[in-house]
Amino acid sequence: MKLMKLEHSGIVLEKGGKKLVFDPVEFAATLPEFDNVAAIIITHAHNDHLQPERISAILDRNPGAKIFAPEDAATVIRNALGAADVTVVKGGDEAFVGGDEIAEGFVGKYEGFKLEFFGKDHASVVAGKVPCQNIGVVVDGKLTNPGDSFDLLEMNGAVEVLLVPEVAPWTKVSETTEFMKIAKPRMVVPVHDGLLSEMGKTIYDNLLRGACEGMGAEFAPLGIGESIEI
């Protein structure tokens, strides 16, 4: 499975010619044009993760793509795009996308992506206040994307690849590294980095790299448009 970094927290996973697109946004960079998109996953409603016009552009090229989002984000998408078919998900839900039935009569058997959703709320920016809903996703039991939270699916310390929000109004480095220690990933890919200057990105990368070295995890920072096999 190939992981490509987009801007900020946007990523694309590709397997067997099919793609999952997470939180596609544009600020300083322009999104590529994607074909063969099986699903778009929006972790929450904040506009650094949810831009309806970007979703619409992907749907124009991939009219069969599914959209998954928590309830409040789904409402934003429907209000902006009208007839957009959005599946509301919550922690504990599962879905399979991007695969064909193996043989006629074997309904529900897929060779695509398995999605396991977890979590409920966005991490608090102001103590005691929940900004919005947030959904985390585990893909194929391999990649964990917590969105804007420190939630994890109970995997008994078996997280393989963890997307880690690098800098945000709701976290600091000590909390981020503690989250990494709890997850015990094999590989860490930093995201939520659109707020950083070039110098700031270097500083935060070095801090997280040091934490990974102490844990025996691989640190894999990616620039916009760069990819890695996971």
Image (spheres, helix red, strand yellow):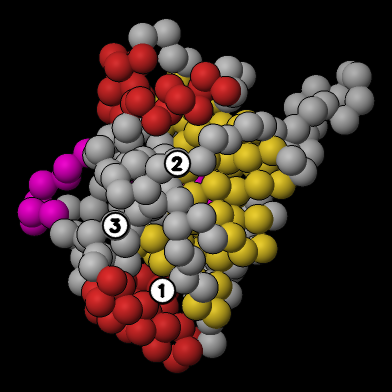
Front: mark 2 or 3: 2
In the displayed orientation, state which residue is furthest to the bottom. Answer: 214
Kind of residue at disc 1: Met
Front: mark 2 or 1: 2
- The image shows residue 60, relative to residue 175, as above or below, that is above
Alpha carbon separation for disc pair 2 and 1:
29 Å
Give residue 86's mark: none
Kind of residue at disc 2: Leu
Q: Splitting the image into 4 quarters, where does residue 35 fall? A: top right
Q: Splitting the image into 4 quarters, where does residue 31 fall? A: top left
Where does label 1 land, which residue? 180
Front: mark 3 or 1: 3
Where does label 3 land, which residue? 194
- Of residues 85 and 96, the one nearer the viewer is 85
Instruction: Give, as a single range, the part of the protein colored magenta.
Output: 125-138
In the displayed orientation, state which residue is furthest to the top. Answer: 83
Residue lying at 91% horizontally and 25% vertically, measured from the top left:
103
